[in-house]
Image (cartoon, rainbow, N blue to C red):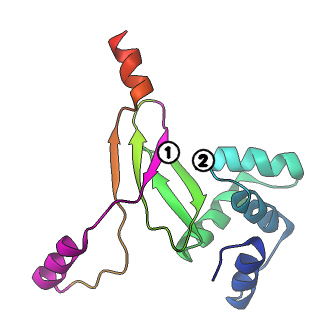
Amino acid sequence: MTLTEKGITHALREKGYKLTPARRLLIEVIVGSNAHLTPAELFEKVRNKSSGVSLVTIYRTLEVLSRLGFICEVYAGEQSRSYLLRRPLEHHHHLICSECGTVLAFTDCDLSTLEEKLIRKTGFRIDRHLLEFSGKCRTCQKKTLA
């Protein structure tokens, strides 16, 4: 399934989720963005379109969309998370700047040998994986040297 606004809302309806105006707005904002956005940034963008949306609604909807695999969740530190529409044919991972929070995606990741080894060793069934590297981006490295 192509992850479009219409496709996501259809899938949510089929799974029995209500499609409130706030939920529809959040889906519209996520589908229309190419950047990883924090819940606060998403809240601001949705609030610009409708003032009747609460931050609790944003968090609850993000949880549903993440659980169902529609969005990609990035952990950028202790309490910081950002979200991006999942691109079904694009398996990717993240480089996260621990200083400024910049998130860069990369696609070159062949973990099949490691996954096979873990399956044999533990008997665990692996459905998906998430790989994130934390460090400092070039800009923040230059600031440190200055």
Residue 80 tag number: 1
Is residue 66 among the parts visible in the rendering? Answer: yes
Cα distance between the residues tagged 2 and 1 = 8 Å
**Badge 2 local density, few (<14 within 10 Å), some, or many (20+)?**
some
Q: Nearer the N terminus, badge 2 or badge 1?
A: 2
Check the image and report above or below for 138 versus 9: above
Front-lying residue, 100 or 79: 100
Q: Would you say the residues marked 2 and 1 are in contact, meaning their CB atoms lie under 8 Å apart?
A: yes
Front-lying residue, 119 or 2: 2
Q: Callout 2: helix, strand or loop?
A: loop
Left or right, 35 with reference to 10: left
**The stretch drawn in magenta includes residue 70:** no
Quarter of the figure with residue 58: bottom right
Quarter of the figure with residue 29: bottom right
Residue 38 tag number: 2
**Quadrant that contains the C terminus:** top left
**Quadrant that contains the N terminus:** bottom right
The residues colored magenta run 100-123
Question: Residue at (46%, 46%) from the top-left corner?
Answer: 104
**Badge 1 local density, few (<14 within 10 Å), some, or many (20+)?**
few
